[in-house]
Amino acid sequence: MTKTEYLQNLADSLRSDRDYEFVIEFRPFMGWFAVPDEGRYIGDRGEYLGLDWKQAEYTIRSLFL
């Protein structure tokens, strides 16, 4: 399992029906982002989760709890 798959599974397991569906992606030199399946506003680039995957894991747990 890759880090992306791990973070995606974590986000999917914590997400409730009222939350957006997010795709977790890594952007080189920028870090991890949760990109919603539909734009929330013009120019929506997603939620910044952190520079490394451990920080992204912590942020995902904070966002969805």
Image (cartoon, rainbow, N blue to C red):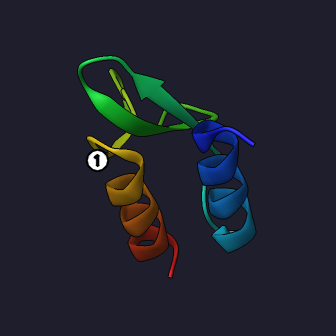
Residue 22, horizontal then vertical, whole percent: 60, 44
What residue is pinned by disc 1?
Answer: 50
41 relative to 59, above or below: above
Picture residue at 47% right of the left edge, 73% below the top: 61
* Image-quadrant location for residue 13: bottom right
Residue at the far front in the pictured view: 1
Can residue 21 be seen at all in this image of the molecule?
no
Quadrant showing the N terminus: top right
Neighbor class of circle 1 (other Cα within 10 Å; few <14, some 14-19, many 20+) is: some
Q: Amino acid at mark 1?
A: Gly
Residue at the far bottom in the pictured view: 65
63 relative to 24, above or below: below
Foreground of the two, 32 or 64: 32
Picture residue at 39% right of the left edge, 57% below the top: 54
* Image-quadrant location for residue 28: top left
Q: Secondary structure at mark 1?
A: strand
Q: How many marks?
A: 1
18 relative to 47, above or below: below
Residue 52, horizontal then vertical, whole percent: 32, 44
Residue 44, horizontal then vertical, whole percent: 37, 29
Residue 32, horizontal then vertical, whole percent: 39, 37
Can residue 47 be seen at all in this image of the molecule?
yes
